């Protein structure tokens, strides 16, 4: 049998037709389709304004450039994709790595609060894997220290907190539309905000600082979204609600099957959060299993189930951050134990049964294997 894939990208006839129409038009750089995608995305998440860009990393870079001064510090979780932190550097700021919560995998408010200094000007919570952060706590921390909030929602399309889409919160929210994301434009990203001034600043930064053709009010970058990407995004938006519900259904099935398996901890979701399950990430209780996480992943592969590791190193363990010499115990703990199982919308009932059965089988075998 073919392995159950960890991710699957499917573009159907409506997306293909929309892309072909753009190619035939000859209008390839941000135009009517991108503008319509911005409007509809903003409406979907409940934001006033949206700015489409060329990638999720570009969205973060623009967001940081819009709010930071040279030397400003930004509180960033140490368990995330490196772009959350590296774009602070490229915007002239200093990323300050903070620990995370072991249950939710999101920013530890306690550690972040300890690391606020007179130079701290912003905080970037990450809605990791589609699980919403402690939004109330972060807003209170930001208000107390007068910090801007840049929410990294690269993996959190359609995530909701107390019935409210996470894209509707101040100050800025950034998204990625990489191929394996819950909504894809091939490559692409988006910033959303309710702040008119921030919106206008981001629009200038995206396109060489131009407010009109060859009139440059400031310096800027070329982070425009391609028109083909905008056309794909418009079609993908129509499917997002149904595809998101599929992911949630699949996650509920896996949790029901795996929640009682000795040695496995299923994802934690707070009662007021609608997780969008970009990843279904479990933790291995290594003291109960006679193997490492990587050995468990290999054993699953032998059973015909693909798994992935997000992330095998915390940011403080990356050579790029070696000079910071910071310890993040929870991030380091997670990096040894976390792994992701298939949860994408194209899985069949049979696929889900194979995933749950393989995890249960491997866990039972590893529990009988002496630790080494």
Image (spheres, helix red, strand yellow):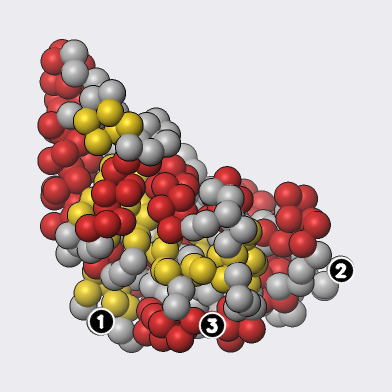
Residue 92 x, y percent position in the rendering:
58, 50
Helix, strand or loop status at disc 2: loop
User: Which residue has dot 3 on it?
Assistant: 109
Mark 3 vs 2: CB contact within 8 A:
no
Classed neighbour count for the residue bearing mark 2: other residues with Cα under 10 Å, few (<14), some (14–19), many (≥20): few
Residue 117 x, y percent position in the rendering:
63, 77
The correct choice, above or below, for 15 with respect to 286 in the image is above
Residue 19 x, y percent position in the rendering:
20, 25
Which residue is at the front of the view, 40 or 121?
121
* Residue at x-position 71% and y-position 69%: 332
The correct choice, above or below, for 70 with respect to 143 in the image is above
* Residue at x-position 17% and y-position 60%: 48
* Residue at x-position 46% and y-position 73%: 147
Q: Quadrant of residue 158?
A: bottom left
**Extreme right residue here?**
372
Q: Is residue 113 left or right of residue 169?
A: right
| Cα distance in 3D space between marks 1 and 2 | 45 Å
Classed neighbour count for the residue bearing mark 1: other residues with Cα under 10 Å, few (<14), some (14–19), many (≥20): few
Q: Which mark is residue 372?
A: 2
Location of the C terminus (image quadrant): bottom right
Which residue is at the front of the view, 354 or 177?
177
Q: Which mark is residue 248?
A: none
Classed neighbour count for the residue bearing mark 3: other residues with Cα under 10 Å, few (<14), some (14–19), many (≥20): many
* Residue at x-position 74% and y-position 79%: 287
On the question of residue 335 being in view, the answer is yes
Q: Nearer the viewer, mark 3 or mark 2?
A: 3
Q: Is residue 61 left or right of residue 275?
A: right
Mark 1 vs 3: CB contact within 8 A:
no
The correct choice, above or below, for 194 with respect to 262 in the image is above
User: Which residue has dot 1 on it?
Assistant: 162
Q: Which mark sits nearer the N-terminus, 1 or 3? A: 3
């Amino acid at each position: 049998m073919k392995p159950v894939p960890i991710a699957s990208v499917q573009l159907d006839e409506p997306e293909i037709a929309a892309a072909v129409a753009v190619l035939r038009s000859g209008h390839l750089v941000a135009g009517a389709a991108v503008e319509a995608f911005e409007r509809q995305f903003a409406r979907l998440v409940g934001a006033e304004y949206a700015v489409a860009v060329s990638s999720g990393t570009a969205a973060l870079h623009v967001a940081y450039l819009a709010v930071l001064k040279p030397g400003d510090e930004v509180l960033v979780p140490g368990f995330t994709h490196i772009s959350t932190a590296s774009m602070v550097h490229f915007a002239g700021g200093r990323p300050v790595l903070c620990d995370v919560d072991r249950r939710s995998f999101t920013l530890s408010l306690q550690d972040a609060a300890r690391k606020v200094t007179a130079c701290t000007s912003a905080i970037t919570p990450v809605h990791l894997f589609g699980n919403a952060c402690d939004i109330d706590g972060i807003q209170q921390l930001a208000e107390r220290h007068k910090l801007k909030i840049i929410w990294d929602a690269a993996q959190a399309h359609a995530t909701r907190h107390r019935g409210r889409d996470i894209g509707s919160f101040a100050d800025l929210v950034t998204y990625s539309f990489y191929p394996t994301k819950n909504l894809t434009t091939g490559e692409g990203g988006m910033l959303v905000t309710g702040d008119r001034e921030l919106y206008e600043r981001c629009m200038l930064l995206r396109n060489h600082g131009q407010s009109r053709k060859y009139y440059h009010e400031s310096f800027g970058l070329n982070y425009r979204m391609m028109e083909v990407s905008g056309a794909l995004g418009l079609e993908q938006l129509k499917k997002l609600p149904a595809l998101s519900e599929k992911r949630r259904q699949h996650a509920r099935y896996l949790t029901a099957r795996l929640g009682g398996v000795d040695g496995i901890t299923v994802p934690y979701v707070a009662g007021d959060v609608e997780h969008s399950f970009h990843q279904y990430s479990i933790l291995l209780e290594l003291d109960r299993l006679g193997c490492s996480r990587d050995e468990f992943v290999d054993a699953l592969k032998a059973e015909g189930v693909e798994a992935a590791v997000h992330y095998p190193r915390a940011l403080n363990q990356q050579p790029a951050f070696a000079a910071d010499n910071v310890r993040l115990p929870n991030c380091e703990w997670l990096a040894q134990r976390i792994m992701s199982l298939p949860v994408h919308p194209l899985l069949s009932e049979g696929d889900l049964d194979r995933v749950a059965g393989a995890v249960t089988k491997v866990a039972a075998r590893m529990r009988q294997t002496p630790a080494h």
